Each structure stands twice: as structure tokens, then as C-alpha cells.
Image (cartoon, helix red, strand yellow):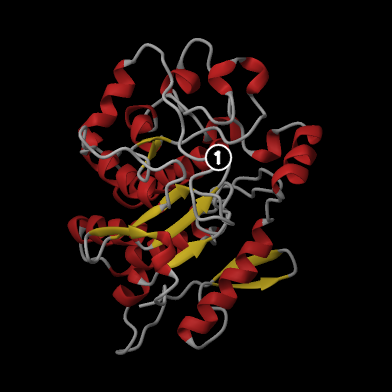
Amino acid sequence: MLTKLIQMDEFPVRPVLPILLQDKTTKKNIIWATGSYAALGEQYAADVQMTTLALVGMDRVLLQPRVLKALSEQQERTKAHAEVFTPSWVCNQMNNFCDEEWFGRKDVFNSQEGHAWTATEELIAFSENKTWKHYVDSRRLEITCGEAPFLVSRYDAATGEEIPIPQRIGQLDRKLRVVNENAADEDEWLKWTLRAFQSVYGYEYQGDNLIIARINLLMTFVEYLEDRWKRQPTIEELKKVANVISWNLWQMDGLKGTVPLGEPEDLNQQVSMFDLFGSEMGFETDAPKAKKTPRCRVFDWRTNESLPFDNVGKESLER
């Protein structure tokens, strides 16, 4: 059930929820950036930071994937933010076109007929010039990503139907299949799985969509680890992956390249033990104050430096 797919108050999400809420540009938290919850109180206004208390506290907001929202709310969000979630069969078709360009051949990961597809059974073949490691490192960006259905496909964003791992079609799912097929041992699997996460990016305006997208990526890591190595992740592994996710899936007004609604204001409320968790990820307490509408920053994991998103377009995303 979808209600079980997004569990913020349970392992493995809750221990790293403060990390998943981070906005790396402002060095604060992402903001709601939607009026959908404003009637619940001032702390849920569009320009206010999202907190762990709001998501897992006694008076928490129950965030749901779009398919579970009331039809009237879906229509209002579509009208206000052009929010339309793409069915998995369309995501698969578009991702297949992307891979056809990269591999130079069709139907690499699956063959599609109408709204259904069949995963290929043979191992994915690579050439000497384009190895499996090149594929894992190749960068992908999903613009206005919503719940990130092009990156990960735990469920069909349009119907809510769960998708088993062998049939998943997201860009990250494909990279993880390649890692599964080629990694010699668990250490190599963990190394290249992390590199796969470092190679997929997405930005989203609305905070509730963004946190669901980030959780979908985190749970994808957990599910593939359990499927391949029959164990749950450690807290340190979760922290490492969550930190990559909070950098690579960021909150942005795509038309302006800035944080939505400008810099979020501080929210005066009691700090929880889960809010304190976020300080472990290395935020600098003496960092300079962000500009009123800071330009969003992303992270280049190969050069180990952050850069303004505006600069990304000056060079190819594919290396």
C-alpha cells in the first residue's frame, strides 16, 4: 500500500529525516512552498521551513503521494503549479529513448508494448569504450521532478500501483540493475551504488513533493540493499546516502533558478532531538547569511565542490 511506502516516523526514514529536510543552498530547511497546509496554522505557511516536528510530531501533517490526494486538491495544484504526474509507462518510454541514445541500440533494459513492458533477461552488454562504470557515472537530471518518477519507480505515480524491483524503470533503477550485475562483492556494490546516487539530479518547487521524492530515493537504496544483500542498512550508510540525496534533489523555482519565495525565515519553536541530528552533517554555524533570493547550488561529486546551478548549463551534463 502507498500509505506504507512513505513512512516518515519509522526506520529507515526517521533517523535521517533532518538530513532529508536540509536545503544545502540556504543551510536551513526546505520550505513548504505551497498553501495546501496553511489552514493548519502559521507554521505551515508557504514561506516557512518544514520541520521534523511538523512531519512526525503529535500534530504532524500526513503527507501523501499525489495519487492519494483528493481530486479537488490535485486539480488545484495542477492549476497553481502545473503539477501533473506522469504514468510509469510514459516514464519508461522516455527513459528508453534516453538509453537508446546512450547505448546506440533499442530495448536495452526492457521492451514496451502499449502501457506494459517486459524486462530483458540477459545481462546488460557494454563495449570497451562505454563500460558499466561509465553508465553508472553518466549524469541525469529530472526537471520539476515532483515525486521523482523518472528517477525511481517504486510505484506508479498516476495509479499508486507498486512496482517490483525487477520491473522498475527509473533512471536510478537502471543504474542499480547494472551495479547488481557487475559488482564483484558488497564493498564494490556499495561504492558504485553511492556513485549511482551521485549521478542523478532533480529539482522541485513544492516542499511536500520534494520530501516525498527524497524519501523515494532513500527507500530505493534500502530496498535494493535488502534485495541484493539480505540486510538492512546501517545508520552511517543511511546518513551518507541521505546527504547525497539532499544535495542532488533540491528545492528551486525553475524559472528563476532561486529558492522558492526567497530565503525562508527562521521558525521560532522548540528544537527536537531529531532536529539536532542534522548538525552532524557538517553545516557551518558561522556561514555567511544567504541572500534574499539565493541562487541554488548543486554539488559536483567528482570535483568535490558545490557550484551555482546556473553554471551547470555551461557544460554538458553528460560526461
Residue lying furthest front: 292
Point 71% across, 51% down: residue: 84
Q: Position of residue 172 (x, y in %)?
A: 44, 60
Query: Which residue in the structure is indicated by mark 1?
Result: 261
Q: Where is residue 111 in the image (x, y as percent from the top left)?
A: 61, 74
> How many numbered marks have been drawn onto this rendered protein structure?
1
The amino acid type found where label 1 is placed reads Leu
The answer to whether 144 appears left or right of 26 in the picture is right
The quadrant holding residue 91 is bottom right
Point 47% across, 28% down: residue: 50
Q: Is mark 1 on a helix, strand or loop?
A: loop
* Foreground pick, 167 / 160: 160
The answer to whether residue 102 is above or below residue 119 is below
* Foreground pick, 99 / 247: 247
* Foreground pick, 185 / 240: 240
The quadrant holding residue 208 is top right
Q: Quadrant of the C terminus?
A: bottom left
Q: In which quarter of the image is the N terminus?
A: top right
Q: Position of residue 160 (x, y in %)?
A: 66, 43
Q: Where is residue 70 in the image (x, y as percent from the top left)?
A: 76, 31
User: Callout 1: few (<14), some (14-19), or many (20+) C-alpha neighbours within 10 Å?
Assistant: some
Q: Does residue 68 appear in the picture of this structure?
A: yes
The quadrant holding residue 9 is top left
The answer to whether 187 appears left or right of 262 in the picture is left
